[in-house]
Image: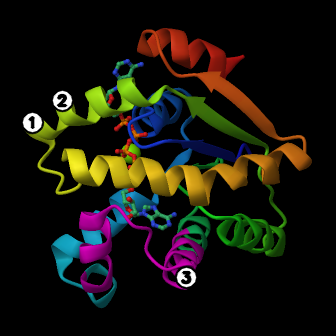
Amino acid sequence: MLNIVISGAPGSGKGTQSAIIVEQYGLSHISTGDMLREEIKAGTENGKKAEALINDGKLVPDEMIIAMLHDRVQNDLNNGSVKGFIFDGFPRTVTQAEALDSILKQKNIRVGVMLNIDVEQNELVKRLLNRGKTSGRSDDNLITIQERINVYEQKTMPVIQFYDKQGKHVRIKGTGTLDEVFAQIEE
Ligand code: AP5
Ligand code: MG
């Protein structure tokens, strides 16, 4: 099984590159951000808890997201022939990274590689403001974008060291065309 963690700041291109990877390799795409937006739309308890946090650019609690992730991995494995997973926007804290390792270990699978897409701040803000014109995402406004970037630097950047220690972290330069970014991922 090919299991990939795709990480990077808000707007770095995690979702965009995940879609290309899924097309080429047929992996199961697990985006915790997409899952939370679906829960909000469906009006579930988790959605209600998550909504204000997402609007403020904060992370939702580890316990909640880890439980959701665990259920989703289990469901995908139950539902047949999974070639592997791409974890998009998870893990976002060291606690989540440790939980992912233990969830996968129970199922005798492991993370193969952690790709961190690196894009400088001005470009992130530009991309997200531009996407905000059409995305309908409540967090694509300047104040929330800045908070999302702060939270990324404080809570999520330590996850890079976590995978560095395991020898699994690969930096991807996230500027250039989609094909140029994907070429580095393929390599
Ligand atoms: P999430 O949905 O994961 O949002 P994010 O991390 O802020 O990232 P985005 O989805 O905005 O960006 P992306 O990196 O996917 O880039 P994209 O490909 O879209 O999380 C949202 C919220 O949910 C969090 O803030 C948190 O509250 C909560 N949450 C989610 N997971 C959680 C977790 N594990 N724990 C706790 N809370 C969690 O690209 C962005 C734009 O750039 C697009 O318009 C795209 O077309 C463009 N673009 C992409 N690549 C290029 C390129 N090479 N050149 C030019 N433009 C490009
Ligand atoms: Mg995304």
Along the line of sight, the residue nearer the viewer: 178 or 141: 141
Q: Secondary structure at mark 1?
A: helix
Of marks 2 and 3, the one in the foreground: 2
Q: Secondary structure at mark 2?
A: helix
In the image, what residue occupies the spot 63% across and 36% down?
116
In the image, what residue occupies the spot 59% across and 42% down?
6
Q: Quadrant of residue 50?
A: bottom left
Picture coordinates of residue 66, whole percent (x, y): 58, 76
Which residue corresponds to mark 3?
67
Tell me whether the residue at label 1 lies in contact with that at label 2, contact meaning CB atoms closer than 8 angstroms. Answer: yes
Picture coordinates of residue 137, whole percent (x, y): 18, 52
Which residue corresponds to mark 2?
130
| Mark 1–mark 2 distance (CA, rounded to whole Å) | 6 Å
Q: Residues within 10 Å of mark 3 (few under 14, many from 20)?
A: few
Report the number of numbered marks.
3
Q: Which mark is residue 27?
A: none
Furthest toward the bottom, the residue is: 45
Q: Which residues are magenta?
A: 48-72
Is residue 91 among the parts visible in the rendering?
A: no
Tell me whether the residue at label 1 lies in contact with that at label 3, contact meaning CB atoms closer than 8 angstroms. Answer: no
Of marks 1 and 3, the one in the foreground: 1
Badge 1 residue CB within 8 Å of ligand 1: no
Quadrant of the image where one finds ligand 1: top left
Along the line of sight, the residue nearer the viewer: 76 or 72: 72
In the image, what residue occupies the spot 76% across and 69% down?
98
Badge 2 residue CB within 8 Å of ligand 1: yes
Going by the numbered disc 2, the residue's amino acid type is Asn
Going by the numbered disc 3, the residue's amino acid type is Ala
Picture coordinates of residue 113, whole percent (x, y): 76, 40
Q: Which mark is residue 133?
A: 1
